[in-house]
């Protein structure tokens, strides 16, 4: 199984990245081939809305550091997207990638029963937030899940932890790390 993990936090090795690492390490122990991209280290632009991917090309016309990431996701069996909550959403780094996935959609995507150029894949969404109230920002995952399912991610799962960050305890609880490892054994086994 090919696993591709995209880290959306600008803080290397912190909360969302730690949960992602425990997931991919457990997947690797099950024989998965893992590639991890730290989006904050890459140079790329958001979608330009040029519609070249609907008119002349079957991929994104932009050639930048996200070109390799988009290709890696295309050949993955399981994709992990990790992000802290920033102002009630994913970080700009991850949103920049998500907007570029528009290039995966076929020209007649609004009406085509197979709207995506992606084959079926599994997805894990990792979200960490400073606010301890789980009801806050609970809309993020279902909102993106709708698009991701359309995109070809047949099974979408959420790993979420609330109430962590520099303003509070800046450490992921052991139970969450064990949950990440158990999910990897279930999904990548
Ligand atoms: C610019 C910025 C915006 C943030 N916005 C929110 C927010 O809207 N809600 C929230 O609960 N936490 C918010 N946080 C806190 C982070 O989500 C939290 O610290 C998270 O655990 C950090 O994850 P990381 O260690 O993976 O970077 C924000 C932090 C920053 C720096």
Image (cartoon, rainbow, N blue to C red):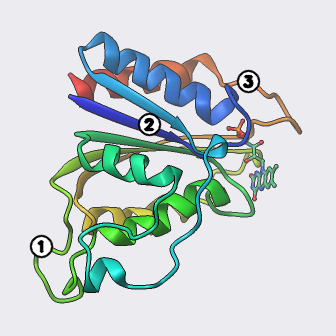
Determine the CA span between mark 3 and mark 1.
42 Å
Residue 31, image quadrant? top left
Residue 40, image quadrant? top right
Q: Quadrant of the N terminus?
A: top left
**Pointers 3 and 1 in contact (CB under 8 A)?**
no
SS for tag 2?
A: strand
* Mark 2 lies on residue: 5
Residue nearest the viewer, comparing 100 with 122: 100
Q: Quadrant of the C terminus?
A: top left
State whether residue 185 is above or below residue 89: above
Determine the CA span between mark 2 and mark 3.
20 Å
Q: Residues within 10 Å of mark 2 (few under 14, many from 20)?
A: many
152 left or right, relative to 173: left
Residue 96, image quadrant? bottom right
Which comes sooner in the sequence, label 2 or label 1? 2
Which comes sooner in the sequence, label 3 or label 1? 1
The residue at the point 26 percent across, 75 percent down is 57
Residue 176 x/y as whole percent: 54, 26
Q: Which numbered marker is on residue 114?
A: 1
The residue at the point 42 percent across, 54 percent down is 67
SS for tag 1?
A: loop
Q: Which numbered marker is on residue 171?
A: 3
Determine the CA span between mark 2 and mark 1.
25 Å
Residue 89 x/y as whole percent: 64, 62
Q: Is residue 3 visible?
A: yes
Q: Residues within 10 Å of mark 3 (few under 14, many from 20)?
A: few
């Amino acid at each position: 199984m090919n696993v591709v993990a995209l880290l959306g936090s600008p803080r290397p090795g912190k909360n969302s990245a730690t949960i992602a690492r425990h997931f991919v390490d457990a997947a690797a122990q099950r024989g998965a081939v893992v590639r991890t991209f730290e989006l904050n280290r890459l140079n790329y632009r958001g979608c330009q809305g040029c519609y070249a991917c609907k008119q002349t090309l079957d991929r994104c016309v932009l050639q930048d550091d996200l070109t390799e990431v988009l290709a890696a996701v295309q050949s993955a069996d399981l994709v992990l997207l990790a992000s802290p909550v920033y102002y009630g959403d994913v970080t700009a780094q991850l949103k920049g990638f998500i907007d570029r996935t528009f290039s995966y959609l076929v020209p007649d995507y609004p009406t085509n029963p197979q709207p995506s150029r992606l084959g079926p894949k599994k997805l894990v969404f990792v979200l960490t937030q400073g606010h301890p109230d789980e009801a806050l920002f609970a809309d993020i995952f279902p909102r993106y899940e709708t698009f991701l399912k359309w995109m070809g991610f047949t099974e979408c799962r959420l790993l979420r932890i609330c109430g962590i960050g520099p303003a509070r305890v800046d450490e992921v609880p052991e139970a969450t790390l064990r949950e990440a490892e158990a999910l990897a054994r279930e999904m990548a086994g």
